[in-house]
Image: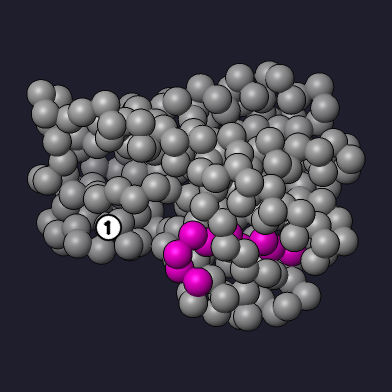
Amino acid sequence: MLIKDQIVLITGAGRGLGADLARAFAREGARLVLNYRSSETAARELAAEFGADRAIAVQADVANADQVSQLVAGAHEHFGAPITTVVNNALPDFSFNGDARAKADGIGYMAFGEQFTGIVGGALNTIQATLPGMRTAGFGNIVNIGTNLFQNPVVPYHDYTAAKAALLAMTRTFAADLGPENIRVNMISGGLLRTTDASAATPEAVFDLIAGSTPLRRVTSPAEFADAALLFASPWSRAVTGQNLVVDGGLVMN
C-alpha cells in the first residue's frame, strides 16, 4: 500500500522528533493521527498545518490502554477507515542529561519500571488497539523508534536503554507472530540528533565530536531520521520485517 493511501498514527507527535515524523509522512500524502499527551497547542498547530482533511490531533497517554482504544476509535470515525501504520515514538518523562543520570550503584528498579511502562507498555497498547483495523485492511506497518545506545552505550541511560532494548525484542517477536497476516514490524534507531528537545542543551563540542566520528562527518538531523521511517512504511520494504535500522550517519554499524 502506498503511503498516500495510509492512515498513520504517530505517538508523541506534538513536538521534537514526532513533529518531524509527521511532516515526513504528510509530505508523502498520508492521513495522520497526531497523538500527544501534554503538548496540545503544538499538536493542534501541526494538525492545522496539514489541514483538517489530512490530520487530527488526539490526546492520549499511550501507557493507558483505555485512552489508546478511544484514540483509535475516534480516528477511525474521523477518517472512515482504519489506521494501517503506527509509529511508536512517544516517551515517558526522561531527563537526557548524562552528567545527572544515576550510575549502576545508585539506580533503582522503579526507574526501569517507569521506562518499561511508557516505552514497552505504550507500544503494546497502540499495537493491540490497531490490530483489528489492520486485519480488516489485510495490511499493516508498525515502526518502533529505538536507540543506538544498545550498541554504543556512551551515556549511562540504564533504564531508558534497557526499555528500548526490550522494545527491540518485542519488535522481533511481534514480527514473527504477525508476519503471516501481512503486518510488518520494524525498528529505527538513532543517536544524538541535531537538534531536538532532548539534545537542545548538548554542548557544541559534543556535536563536533560525534560528527567527526561518523563516516558522513555530520550529526543526523531529525528530518533525516524521519525520512528513514518512510522506508518501512512504503512498498519498497514489503519483504522486510523484524529489522533494526540504525540511522546515525554510520557511527554504529551492524
Q: Secondary structure at mark 1?
A: loop
Q: Is residue 81 above or below residue 102?
A: below
Label 1 neighbour load within 10 Å: few <14, some 14-19, many 20+: some
The colour scheme of the drawn protein is one colour
Residue 34 falls inside the magenta stretch: yes
In the displayed structure image, the side of residue 188 where residue 220 appears, left or right:
left
Q: In x, y percent, where is residue 141?
A: 71, 40
Q: Amino acid at mark 1?
A: Ser
Q: Name the residue located 75 percent from the left edge and 24 percent from the top edge.
A: 179
Q: How many marks?
A: 1
Residue 198 falls inside the magenta stretch: no
Q: In x, y percent, where is residue 235?
A: 77, 43
The residue nearer to you, when weighing 111 against 161, is 111
Question: Dividing the image into 4 quarters, which one contains the C terminus?
Answer: top left
Q: Name the residue located 58 percent from the left edge and 67 percent from the top edge.
A: 23
The answer to which quarter of the image holds residue 29 is bottom right
Disc 1: which residue: 199
In the displayed structure image, the side of residue 88 where residue 86 appears, left or right:
right
In the displayed structure image, the side of residue 118 where residue 150 appears, left or right:
left
The residue nearer to you, when weighing 104 against 113, is 113
Taking the view exactly as shown, the residue that stands out farthest to the front is 66
Task: Using the rendered image of the protein, determine whether residue 208 is visible from the camera's viewpoint.
Answer: no
Q: Name the residue located 28 percent from the left edge and 31 percent from the top edge.
A: 110
Instruction: Write the start and end of the magenta stretch as one range.
Output: 30-40
The answer to which quarter of the image holds residue 49 is bottom right
